[in-house]
Image (spheres, helix red, strand yellow):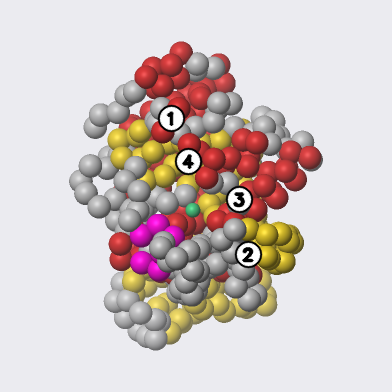
């Protein structure tokens, strides 16, 4: 696995600053846990998200109703992963050579995973734009279908995959992680500017903004990832390249100044313009379906996409600091649970023991964190309880069974045959 070196890369290595070294030593001590997490990143789950987003038919921000439903889908996914997410609506009116006049509501999504054992108030932001655009590249006529599978359902899928991994492993970091989806990127980074400006005005301290835009197209064996950089973040891109080389099968590519023009073409540029450090990952081989109705889920390479997601998880571990308490329950257990048979084909038996009385909820979630069944019991006494769940109507696959008490939750994987 070779890193593609160019002159810029050599200059960057001279610019490493002390904070990188500090964070680097933090990671060295925790790389074991990170290495156990990376294989959990799942190509099928990325494909599922890309397909869900493509199924909106169009995510063009100016269509009637705009991207509200898309934002709701993303916010729901984050909330189901235990990340408090809200839609941040803003309005913008103007004129653009391609789309004409507009006067529209736009819908960003903001989710927050709060830090534990935080040293300061800094945060790490991982983001991707949720909107899409497509047009006839001869006539510039806008097209009705804007599936935007690579551009940029792929980036949103990476962000949601991070949330899924955090949730399933109960991960905590030493910095807040903000999960962002931006609307109106294709019209001029509207969502990025709106959010970055607000954060700049309120004096937020963003350690790094990690942007993914078009990260799933890779037609051949020569896997590369372009890491666009900003002149306030040279240490970040240098570290990002090292991380990509260390934790993935992708060769990172740091463009030279003349190859770096596209750094301006995505939301990370809005953060840079507001004084924040950022890095922008994009496929090295540019998609041939860019901004057309051919940008569909089938054209992507999900093994490559999963590896880009691994780079992102390693970046979060590096910059947000994966806490020592990985996978450790925050609250004392009052429940133990067993689910059987496992795999199950029809009826699953949930057998659980409470050490004190508590209202409880038993929830079954699919791989995407969607709740497919929930049963609430108002007050259960201390002692042994048995409930039966009818799993017959669910498609085969992996599910999570969660037992929620007043003092926390127990989760176990349940395979449906
Ligand atoms: Zn894009």
Q: Position of residue 123 (x, y in %)?
A: 64, 38
Report which residue position mark 4 lands on: 262
- Magenta span includes 397: no
Left/right of residue 308 with respect to residue 273 in the rendered view: left
Assign the N terminus to one quadrant of the image. Answer: top left
Give the residues in magenta: 289-294
The label nearer to you, 1 versus 2, is 2
Q: Is residue 380 above or below residue 268?
A: below
For the residue carrying disc 1, how many other residues have a C-alpha within 10 Å: few (<14), some (14-19), or many (20+)? few
Q: Earlier in the sequence, mark 1 or mark 3?
A: 3
For the residue carrying disc 3, how many other residues have a C-alpha within 10 Å: few (<14), some (14-19), or many (20+)? many
- Residue found 21% across the figure and 49% down from its top: 220
Q: Give me the disc on residue 258.
A: 1
Q: How many angstroms separate mark 2 from mark 4 (CA)?
A: 24 Å
- Residue found 50% across the figure and 28% down from its top: 236
Q: Earlier in the sequence, mark 3 or mark 2?
A: 2
Report which residue position mark 3 lands on: 189
Q: How many angstroms separate mark 3 from mark 2 (CA)?
A: 16 Å
Is 289 or 215 nearer to us in this picture? Answer: 289
Main secondary structure of the magenta stretch: loop
- Residue found 49% across the figure and 68% down from its top: 141
Q: Position of residue 374 (x, y in %)?
A: 55, 77
Q: Position of residue 369 (x, y in %)?
A: 49, 66
Image quadrant in which you'd find residue 349 = bottom left
For the residue carrying disc 2, how many other residues have a C-alpha within 10 Å: few (<14), some (14-19), or many (20+)? few
| Residue 4 visible in the snapshot | yes
Q: Secondary structure at mark 4?
A: helix
Q: Give me the disc on residue 100.
A: 2
Q: Earlier in the sequence, mark 2 or mark 4?
A: 2
């Amino acid at each position: 696995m070779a890193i593609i070196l160019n002159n810029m890369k050599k200059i960057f290595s001279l610019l490493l600053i002390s904070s990188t070294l500090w964070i680097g030593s933090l990671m060295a001590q925790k790389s074991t846990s990170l290495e156990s997490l990376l294989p959990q990143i799942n190509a099928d789950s990325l494909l599922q998200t890309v397909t869900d987003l493509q199924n909106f038919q169009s995510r063009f921000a100016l269509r009637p109703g705009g991207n509200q439903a898309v934002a709701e889908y993303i916010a729901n996914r984050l909330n189901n992963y235990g990340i408090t997410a809200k839609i941040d609506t803003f309005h913008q009116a103007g004129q653009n050579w391609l789309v004409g006049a507009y006067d529209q509501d736009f819908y960003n999504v903001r989710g927050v995973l709060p830090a534990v054992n935080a040293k300061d108030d800094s945060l790490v932001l991982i983001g991707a734009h949720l909107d899409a655009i497509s047009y006839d590249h001869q006539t510039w006529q806008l097209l009705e279908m804007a599936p935007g599978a690579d551009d940029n359902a792929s980036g949103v899928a990476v962000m949601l995959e991070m949330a899924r991994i955090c949730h399933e492993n109960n991960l905590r970091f030493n910095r807040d992680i903000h999960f962002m989806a931006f609307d109106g990127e294709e019209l001029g980074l509207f969502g990025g500017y709106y959010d970055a400006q607000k954060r700049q005005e309120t004096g937020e301290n963003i350690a790094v903004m990690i942007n993914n835009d078009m990260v799933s197209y890779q037609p051949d064996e020569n896997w590369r990832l372009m890491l666009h950089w900003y002149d306030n973040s040279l240490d970040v891109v240098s570290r990002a390249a090292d991380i990509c080389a260390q934790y993935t099968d992708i060769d990172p590519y740091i463009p030279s100044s003349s190859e770096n023009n596209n750094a301006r073409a995505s939301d990370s540029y809005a953060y840079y313009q507001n004084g924040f450090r950022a890095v922008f990952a994009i496929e090295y081989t540019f998609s041939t379906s860019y901004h057309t109705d051919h940008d569909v889920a089938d054209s992507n390479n999900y093994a490559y996409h999963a590896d880009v997601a691994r780079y992102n998880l390693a970046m979060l571990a590096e910059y947000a600091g994966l806490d020592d308490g990985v996978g450790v329950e925050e609250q004392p257990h009052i429940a133990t649970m067993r689910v059987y048979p496992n795999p199950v084909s029809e009826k699953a038996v949930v057998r659980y023991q409470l050490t004190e009385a508590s209202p409880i909820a038993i929830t079954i979630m699919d791989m995407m964190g969607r709740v497919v069944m929930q049963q609430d019991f108002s007050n259960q006494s201390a002692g042994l309880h048995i409930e039966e769940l009818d799993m017959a109507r669910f498609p085969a696959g992996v599910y999570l069974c969660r037992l929620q008490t007043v003092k926390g939750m127990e989760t176990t994987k349940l395979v449906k045959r």
